[in-house]
């Protein structure tokens, strides 16, 4: 059986630029070299052909022991990798260590499947190692090397530059990240309940986040309504004060009729700003009186002020200081009562 030999490219200067070239080995029986592991490689021992054959038999027994009992799945018993100088090749046992480690944590069916594949591979290596004579053919190995050199002479292997220290550190970092992810790959099989727990945590976190979002939105809406209400109240208050100032100015000028008119509207705007009723400019003065609580002091004061206003403004009667003072008294009583109710609220 013709084997495949993986040759590490010696012409590439940096450790990340090496390539393994598949050599169509012309020599029958050349043992297959294992590709380097993604993680840090195990130590390598220099052994003879006989020692290598004995190692293969020992590992075959280790595979059989693991297939029979999970206690026999001990990756530490694999030992270091081998370098057989007589046959000009190296053997990496990383694949077997990984298979034993995975089999130790796997179910019996999966362990049997892993050990079956490992047993077939070890048996094939034992068969290849039993024919060392052909593998030592120097001429055939030289021809294989010549073909490898021809491949390495291609443009894709030229102008290889050595990486900087920073690039090397980044490569080491991502190597450790890959190792950590490889270690997490078997967590799901060892802890089947972990997936369900993560699902509940994700859904629970999403629900809590939604509740917090809704609560925050409601608080913002409530604050916006409060600020809007406060701003409207301030606007009504300013307008009422403007009407009262206009009444004072008219009284100083002796225009008592306009003074009572301004004082009346200062009262209406003040009560409207304190939510005694909803704004509706189409109401008549007596409709405003009926909107207040029947028999209350507020209704009585507004009725008295409305009577003075209607008699002077709509009745076109002559007004005097006494009329203004009476209207002023009703205004002050309504202002004090409204302020007391607003403070209590």
Image (tube, rainbow, N blue to C red):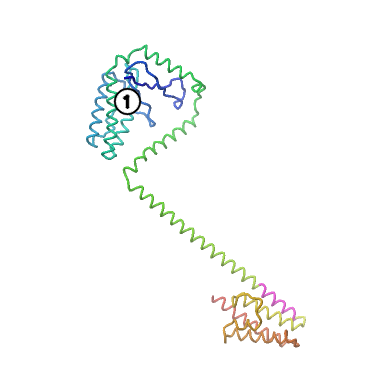
Where is residue 294 shown, x and y percent of the image?
57, 85
Q: Quadrant of the N terminus?
A: top left
**Horizontally, is 304 left or right of 251 in the view?**
left
Would you call the spot at circle 1 few (<14 residues within 10 Å), some (14-19), or many (20 or more)? some
Residue 180, located in which quarter of the rendered image? top left
Where is residue 161 shown, x and y percent of the image?
51, 24
Kindly give the residue lying farthest to the top in the view shown.
Answer: 139
Magenta segment, which residues?
Answer: 238-251
Residue 112, located in which quarter of the rendered image? top left
Q: Residue at x 29, y 23 (%)?
A: 125
Residue tagged 1: 81
In the image, residue 318 above or below residue 158:
below
In the image, residue 33 above or below residue 75:
above
Residue 124 forms part of the magenta stretch: no
Q: Nearer the viewer, residue 335 or 143?
A: 143
Secondary structure character of the magenta stretch overall: helix
Q: Residue at x 39, y 19 (%)?
A: 24
Q: Residue at x 63, y 75 (%)?
A: 279
């Amino acid at each position: 059986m013709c084997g495949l030999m993986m040759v590490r490219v010696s012409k590439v200067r940096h450790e990340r630029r090496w390539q393994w070239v598949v050599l169509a080995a012309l020599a029958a029986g050349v043992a297959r070299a294992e590709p380097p592991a993604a993680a840090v490689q195990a130590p390598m021992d220099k052994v003879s052909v006989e020692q290598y054959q004995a190692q293969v038999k020992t590992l075959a027994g280790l595979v059989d022991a693991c297939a029979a009992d999970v206690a026999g799945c001990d990756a530490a018993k694999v030992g270091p990798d081998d370098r057989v100088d007589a046959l000009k090749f190296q053997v990496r046992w990383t694949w077997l260590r990984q298979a034993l480690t995975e089999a130790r944590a796997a179910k019996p069916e999966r362990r049997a499947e892993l050990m079956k594949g490992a047993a077939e591979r070890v048996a094939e290596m034992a068969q290849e190692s039993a024919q060392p004579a052909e593998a030592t053919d120097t001429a055939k190995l030289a021809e294989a090397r010549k073909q490898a050199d021809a491949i390495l002479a291609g443009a894709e292997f030229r102008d290889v530059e050595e990486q900087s220290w920073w690039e090397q550190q980044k490569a080491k970092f991502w190597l450790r990240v890959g190792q950590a992810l490889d270690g997490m790959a078997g967590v799901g099989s060892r802890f089947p309940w972990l997936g369900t727990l993560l699902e509940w945590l994700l859904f629970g976190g999403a629900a809590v986040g939604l509740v917090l979002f809704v609560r925050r939105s409601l608080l913002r809406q409530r604050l916006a309504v409060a600020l809007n209400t406060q701003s409207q109240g301030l606007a009504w208050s300013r307008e009422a004060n403007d009407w009262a100032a206009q009444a004072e100015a008219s009284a100083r000028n002796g225009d008592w009729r306009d003074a009572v008119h301004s004082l009346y509207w200062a009262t209406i705007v003040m009560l409207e700003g304190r939510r005694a009723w909803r704004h509706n400019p189409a109401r008549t003065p007596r409709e405003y009186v009926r909107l207040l609580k029947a028999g209350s002091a507020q209704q009585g004061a507004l009725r008295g002020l409305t009577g003075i206003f209607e008699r002077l403004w709509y009745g076109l009667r002559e007004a005097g200081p006494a009329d203004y003072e009476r209207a002023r008294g009703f205004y002050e009583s309504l202002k004090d009562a409204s302020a007391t109710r607003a403070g209590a609220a």
